[in-house]
Image: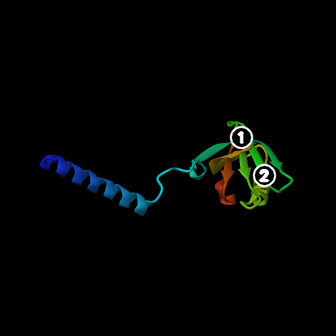
Amino acid sequence: MQKEEKVVVVLLFMALGSLASASWALGDFEEDPDEISISLVAEGTVSSMKTTAGGHLIMRLQSSSIPIFVSRESGAEEVAVRVAKGDRIRVVGEISEYEGDREISVKRPGDVEVLR
C-alpha cells in the first residue's frame, strides 16, 4: 500500500469513528410521524356544535371542512358555555387525525376566542 492510500484509509476510519460517536451521542435520527404536529389558527363563524357522549365538543366553521375538536380534558364544557352557533371565533390548535379524518385539536379553553 502506498503512503497516500494509507492516509486515505486512516482518514476514512477517523470519519467513521466520528459518525459513530455522533450517532451514539445524539441518538436516533429517524422522525416519528406521530410526533410531528402542525399548529394553525382558524377563524370563522360556527355553523354547528355537538357535545359527544364522552363530554367532548366538536365544532364546525362555515369556512372550513375540518372539524374543531375540544376534549373534555382540554375544557370542552367551558368552551361550550362561551361559544354559540353563529359566533365568529378564532381557534389555535394542532392538526390531528381521528379514525382517518383530520381535525383541529384544541389544547386549552383559552385557545378558542369569541370575536366581537
- Marks counted in the figure total 2
The spot of residue 105 in percent (x, y) is: 68, 51
Tell me: 52 left or right of 101: right
For badge 1, the amino acid type reads Gly
Residue 5 in view, yes or no: yes
The figure's colour scheme reads: rainbow
The picture places residue 86, in percent across and down from the top left corner, at: 76, 43
**Residue at label 1?**
100
Residue drawn at x 79%, y 59% as measured from the top left: 77
Q: Residues within 10 Å of mark 2 (few under 14, many from 20)?
A: many
Residue 48 quadrant: top right
Residue at the disc numbered 2? 57
Q: What kind of element bears circle 2?
A: strand
Residue 115 appears in the figure: no
Q: Residue 109's image quarter?
A: bottom right
Residue lying at the far front of the rendered structure: 1
The amino acid type found where label 2 is placed reads Leu
Q: Is residue 35 left or right of residue 10?
A: right
Where's residue 29, x and y in %? 46, 53
| In this rendering, position of residue 21 left or right of residue 10 | right
Could you tell which of marks 1 and 2 lies nearer the N-terminus? 2
Q: Residue furthest left?
A: 3
Which is nearer the eye, 79 or 6? 6
